[in-house]
Image (cartoon, grey):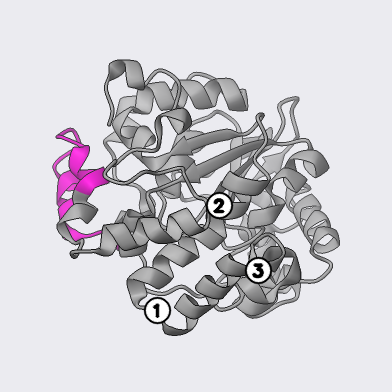
Amino acid sequence: MTFSARLKGRISNIHIQGKRPDIFAFSAPRSGSTFLLELLYAQKRMKVYNEPLNINKAAVREQLGIDTWEELTCMENREVLFEAYFRRLMANAVPALNVPFYRRTSRFFTTRHTFKIMHGAEDMIDWFRTTFGGRILVLVRHPISTTFSHKIYPRLPYFLKFPPLRALFSEAQLQEAERIIACGDHFERGIVNWCLQNYPALNVHRHPDWAVVSYEDLTMYPEKSVAYLEEKLDLDPTPDLERIVNRPSFSTVQSDKETKKFFAAGGSGDRQFLIEKWRKRIRPGQEERCFEILDLFGMDFYERGNLYPADRYRVPGVLNGGGS
C-alpha cells in the first residue's frame, strides 16, 4: 500500500473512544447484514468496520498474514492474532479499512465502533464480548432463503478440518455433514453451510446478554426490532427509520430483479415477499430435506412451514402485533 493511500485513510477519520462499548455484529453472508449495518451507521459518531475478516480485502490479508479461506478458517493462535488485529483497528492503525470520506457512511469524528464480522470466528462470539467488553449482536436468516442467495460456499470444505470447530459436533453430525460436503447437491450443501456457521452461536455459546434478531423480524417489524436493539446495544433512538427501511442497501446489487424493482419503486409496498420469495423457487422435497438436516444438528431456530423463527426466538412484542 502506498504512503498516499495510508495517509488518506488515516485523515478520513479521527476516533476518540467514548464511554459506550463497541458493538460486534455477527452474521453469515447473505443474511441481511448490510441493511442492519445501515441502521447502525445512522448512529451519531459511529465508526463501522465492514467485514474485517473478509480476505478478499488486501488489507485484511496483510494484517492477518494469510491468503486463503482455509488459513482463516483453520487459523492457529487465532485468539492472539485476532486480539492484536482488533486492537489495531480500535486504535485507527489500519487506515486502509476506514470508510472512504466520499461515502455517505463516512464519519470524520467518531466515538464508538461497530464491527460487522462474517466469514470467520463463529465459535468465538462470546470471546469478543469478554475480551473487548463489547456488546454482541447476532443476525440470523432462514436457511433456505440464505441458501438460495448463495452461488458458492468458499469456506465449507474447511470447517470440519479445524479441531475446535469439529469438537462441537457429534459423530453422527460429522458423518452426515462430511457426506453432504463431498457428495450433496448445492441445496444440501447450503443448508449444511448454514448449520456449521450458526450452530456455535445458536446451540453452544449463546449468552443472555447478546442481542439476537432475525432478518424476518427486522424486515417486517423494523420499529419493534430496532427498539429491541436500542435497548440491548445501548443505542440512541434511530433517526429516519422509515427512510432507512425503504432505501435499498449497498448489497442490493446482488439481489434478484424483483427485489431491485421493489426498492426502485420506493420500498414502501408489501414487504412480505422479501421473506417468502424463496417459496417460489423451492422444489418438492427440499423444505423437508432442509429440516431433516436442521433436526440432525438440533437447530430449532426455524420450524417447518413457518417463515419466521420459532416463537421463543422472536423479537419482543412482534407476536402481539401479528407475525407467523
Q: CA distance from mark 3 to mark 2?
A: 13 Å
Disc 1 residue type? Gly
Mark 1 = which residue? 184
**Pointers 2 and 1 in contact (C-beta within 8 Å):** no
Please tell me whether residue 283 is drawn above or below residue 250 in the rendered image.
below
Q: Which residues are magenta?
A: 253-276
Please tell me whether residue 305 is drawn above or below residue 212 in the rendered image.
below
Residue 8, can we see it? Answer: no
**Nearest the eye: 97 or 162:** 162
Q: Which element is circle 2 on?
A: loop
In which quadrant is the C terminus drawn? top left
Q: Nearer the viewer, mark 2 or mark 1?
A: 1
**Nearest the eye: 133 or 280:** 280
The quadrant in which residue 236 appears is: top right
**Pointers 3 and 2 in contact (C-beta within 8 Å):** no
Main secondary-structure element of the magenta-colored stretch: helix
Mark 3 = which residue? 59
Estimate the x, y position of residue 109 in percent, counting from the top left. Answer: 64, 36
Residue at the image position 55 percent from the left and 28 percent from the top: 44
Kindly identify which numbered label has been placed on residue 169: none
